[in-house]
Image (tube, rainbow, N blue to C red):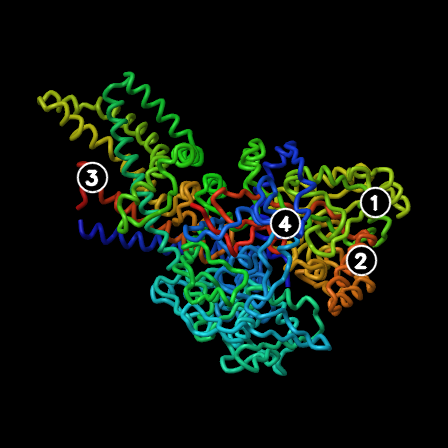
Amino acid sequence: MFAYIIRRILAAAVLLLVVSAVTFAIFFLLPRLAGETVDQLATQYIGKNPSPDAIAAVKKNLGLDQPLYTQYWNFLKGLVSGAEYKFGPEPATCHVPCFGYSFKNHLEVWPELSKRIPVTLSLAIGAATLWLVSGVATGVVSALRPRSIFDRISMGIALAGVSLPVFFTGALLLTVFSYEWPILDNLQYVNFTDDPLMWARNLILPWISLAFLYSALYARLTRAGMLETMSEDYIRTARAKGLAERKVVTRHGLRAALTPIVTIFGMDLGLLLGGALITEQVFSLQGVGQFAVQAISDNDLPKILGTTLLAAFFIVLCNLVVDLLYAAVDPRVRLS
Amino acid sequence: MRRSRTVALTATAAAAVLVVTGCSSSTKSTDAKSTASGSATEAAGGSGANAATKGIVNASDKKGGTVTFEMKGTPDSLDPGNTYYAYIYNFSRLYGRPLTTFQPGAGEAGNKLVPDLAESLGQVSADGLSWTYKLRKGLKYDDGTPITSKDVKYAVERSNFAPDVNSNGPTYFKELLVDNPTPYEGPYKDKTGDLKSIETPDDTTIVFHLTHAFADFDYLVSAPQTVPVPQAKDTGAEYVKKIVSSGSFKFESYEDGKQAVLVPNTNWDPSTDPIRKQLPDKIVLRMNIDQATIDKDLLAGNAQVDLVGGGVDPQTQAQILQNPKLKANTDNAYGGRLVYMAINTDVAPFDNIECRKAVQYAVDKVSVQTALGGPVRGQVANTVLPPDIPGHQDFNVWETKDNKGDEAKAKAALKACGKDSITTVLSARTERATEVAAATSIQAALKKVGINAEIQQFPQGKYLADSAGAPKFAKEHNIGLMMMQWGADWPTGYGFLQQIVDGRAIKASGNSNLASLNDPAVNKLLDDAATNPDRAAREKIYGDIDKKVMEAAVYVPLTDFKVFLYRPDNATNLASTPAFSGEYDYLNIGTTK
């Protein structure tokens, strides 16, 4: 078990390294191949008055005049040991992990980015809990009573959920609950540690709109999985043994049906942690996704690079957790 | 140097906004013509549509409450020495006092320049080369330390001479002030030296020495670049996180890209400040808010002001225009910006004035206006100077019936040019959907008279640097016609015209004189205006320049851009000011909430 975990962590690290190299190449190598000069890159740091002096200074300060592999090496070094840049009166230290400086306002990327993580984390975890519970429960009940009224209605709602994008449901919820009947108005993110009640109150609409989309998908997946497992031979055996129906369903049926759900859940959660772009935009939540959108519209490469790596990190991490969970969920998988 | 601080962000926002408005432009704005006519009276009170373009709406001295500003996206910086957006020029005055500023007021009253940190406007020497300002007595920062003229000098140095640290703002001072014998490298690189051409003989006096006479200097020092910064507190790019306040409010907190909270500055002394009121208990600026949310918050009174001030989004606009009650709370003001098409005199056959005339006559400005979002988003323009800039005169050199174009006149001009048809390229910016739509409308009008313009789109970030604004590139690619928008950095004819009509301002890259107009008579008039100490005389010259430029037929004015703002009932002291692109003046907004 221990060796397995170590192996997986190492593999994850290598994967992240590859992701970082590919992203770095996309942002710094491809534009060059397409004919962008180092001067043009440096100009992006300077804003509206790119004088030759300023361009030269930026190139030197950021090491843009060095060969690309050196720059990549420095970038990696910055991630683990920090770096020093010369902006402002004193040389500024870019702290670990150093993702460099924003093109737009010359501030370090990581402190700004890391401040966004709690927002996205709150959004993702809350929504995920909601959709997992409601989705799986609906799926199970539907599967146990196929073609019943409950099944038809809930699967109908699920179909609507899958089809309706967050920017529709979100805006609808906002209009109804925030503006027409202001039960939940003035939604602004509050830290969980500051005021858990306000935290939940202000996040409930984003949770619901996000969870609506996903729980529909999970309900359908669970239903299909359950229908299949419940017709397996070992279920019949379990019933024949005289097990209570509840145990048959939870211990034998659901457990097997959960394996694909766990896989997808890991992916979905990882993706969301990298930024729920649309939800954050609709509800003006200042999370990682909004940071990414802003960075892209500002053409701010270091910020984009930072969010990409963060997203990759979350996806890799969630997948790692999923692999470990398999062992717990599915008796057929034993790590040894 | 680029005079478009209003353009970049508002325009992207507006572009997105305008796409949809194009479809709903049939909603007639009946009072569009009467807006922003600029009654100079400082009328308090008044209500109804466009009330805040005529006087201060909800004038009140009521203290307390929280005033919330919301914005789409983020500003370039809240650091007064590192910004180039009109709305930050406006907003920063809450926590920073420049030497001069604009008096809060609507219409022409808002264009009035008054001393702020200085006790009076500048004293200019007989040769026009030295400007002296005296600071008011008893000025203090929020930490209680006194404000000195050295801090103003330092602020100008850090904002103009350190492009690798404070890169966002314009560098007019650098270009105007006499440099040291060995060029000054700015306060970060040259820690002991300073710029010798700014003198501070004592703690309340500051003298600027210029390379040439510049009559608009009082306007130049209204930029937040003269907001004092104590050198000991300056942390370069990090200064934005701990800005020292000289205004009526100070920072309680600042989170990049999220929000800033301002609270009353207890060390600000109202007896030193005739224009600020310090009304609310708290001012919150929320960033990165969805435009639809901002609009809803304004309608619900949860927010008082949309900081960017470009106007509500198209759905909201449609909703408001259909509801007389909501419409009574709106202001449709000029945004100090001209939407136009430049005719490149560098590219044949537009070196011939007759061919340029053909274009002037051919364009159907009404259909262009529709493409740009209809009358609510801009009035048809026939002059280069917008109506909200002093010196604007009404005339129409290339008149066509109802501004709809005149095929016969255009064809006649084409004939006089010795052509049956012309093939050329019309450039526009990819990100600006309405600009492309306007270009398409122009293309159709030109085709009717035999001018075939192929539309080529370029990314806006490189429009002036590498394509339309690079004369060599434009010539090589046969770009004879170019879509463009222009706003002034300060509301004078010089501030608006110089970069786009001065032949000596033509640059190999980042050129804004897109027509490549180099008319000695125009250049001379600009110099006359720059050195003429008499304001009325200067304003007359700007009108004359405008006429000369229009007679040369090098620019096709399309529309004078307008903003469409919503005023929540619970916001007080709202006046749409031409000094800040039609935005409300942010200095004294309070709330009754």
The answer to whether residue B205 of the structure is visible from this angle is: yes
Residue B335 marker:
4
Q: Estimate the x, y position of residue B509 in percent, counting from the top left.
A: 67, 61
Q: Which quadrant of the view contains residue B375? A: top right
The chain to which mark 4 is attached is: B
Residue A333 marker:
3
Q: Which residue is mark 1?
A: B358
Q: Looking at numbered disc 4 in the image, what kind of residue is underneath it?
A: Gly
In which quadrant of the rendered image does the C terminus of chain B lie?
Answer: top left
Q: Looking at numbered disc 1 in the image, what kind of residue is underneath it?
A: Ala
Label 3 secondary element: loop
Alpha carbon of mark 2 to alpha carbon of mark 1: how far?
A: 23 Å
Q: How many marks?
A: 4
In which quadrant of the rendered image does the N terminus of chain B lie?
Answer: bottom right
Q: Residue at x 79, y 55 (%)?
A: B549
Q: Earlier in the sequence, mark 2 or mark 1?
A: 1
Q: Which residue is mark 2?
A: B544
Alpha carbon of mark 1 to alpha carbon of mark 4: how far?
A: 29 Å
The chain to which mark 2 is attached is: B
Is mark 4 in CB contact (under 8 Å) with mark 2?
no
Q: Residue at x 67, y 40 (%)?
A: B32
